Image: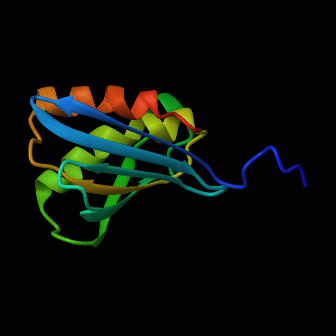
Amino acid sequence: MSSTEPVVRSRQTEKEVNGISTQVVCTEFSNYIFIVLTQYGKMGTLISVTPDSRSNDISTSAFSTKVLLGKDEPLTHVCAKNLATFVSQEAGNRPVLMGLALKDSSIDAIKQMKEIIKSCQVW
């Protein structure tokens, strides 16, 4: 095994989103992409975002969300799906495990956060 290639690839960054410090950590595992997106400095609610196995066409794939730990609220599912769908599609339809702790979950903030996630691409 080569010592130059890390076993687990990970990238992180911190940017301001509507005046709120936002940290992102993206980590690639063989079977999952793990993303932590926080405006509180902690992991927050843990959500699994998985591609629907019944959909064979990647352009029309459906995604299921499931809160594993934390508050199970409709807005949590909407945010997770919006933030993780493109990651899963770009990573060959791998499931995404996402930790979310957001102060601002407005549409504008979500768009900015997607760009931050893209800047930490490990998949």
As drawn, 4 above or below 1: above
Q: How many marks?
A: 0
Which residue is rendered at x = 9% and y = 31% of the image? 19
Out of 81 and 102, give the one closest to the viewer: 102
Is any atom of residue 51 visible in this view?
Answer: no
Where the N terminus falls, by quadrant?
Answer: bottom right
Which residue is rendered at x = 55% and y = 43% of the image? 93
Q: Can you name the residue that lies furthest to the bottom here?
A: 69
Where the C terminus falls, by quadrant?
Answer: top right
Out of 43 and 97, give the one closest to the viewer: 43
Task: Write down the quadrant of residue 67 in the picture.
Answer: bottom left
Residue 83: x, y in percent? Answer: 31, 40
Out of 93 and 33, give the one closest to the viewer: 33
The colour scheme used here is: rainbow
Which residue is rendered at x = 84% and y = 50% of the image? 3
* Relative horizontal placement of residue 27, taking residue 40 as reference (left or right): right
Is any atom of residue 80 visible in this view?
Answer: yes
Residue 94: x, y in percent? Answer: 56, 48
Q: Can you name the residue that lies furthest to the right here?
A: 1
Residue 45: x, y in percent? Answer: 25, 64
Task: Write down the quadrant of residue 65 in the picture.
Answer: bottom left
Which residue is rendered at x = 43% and y = 29% of the image? 118
Residue 77: x, y in percent? Answer: 22, 54
* Relative horizontal placement of residue 102, taking residue 26 as reference (left or right): left
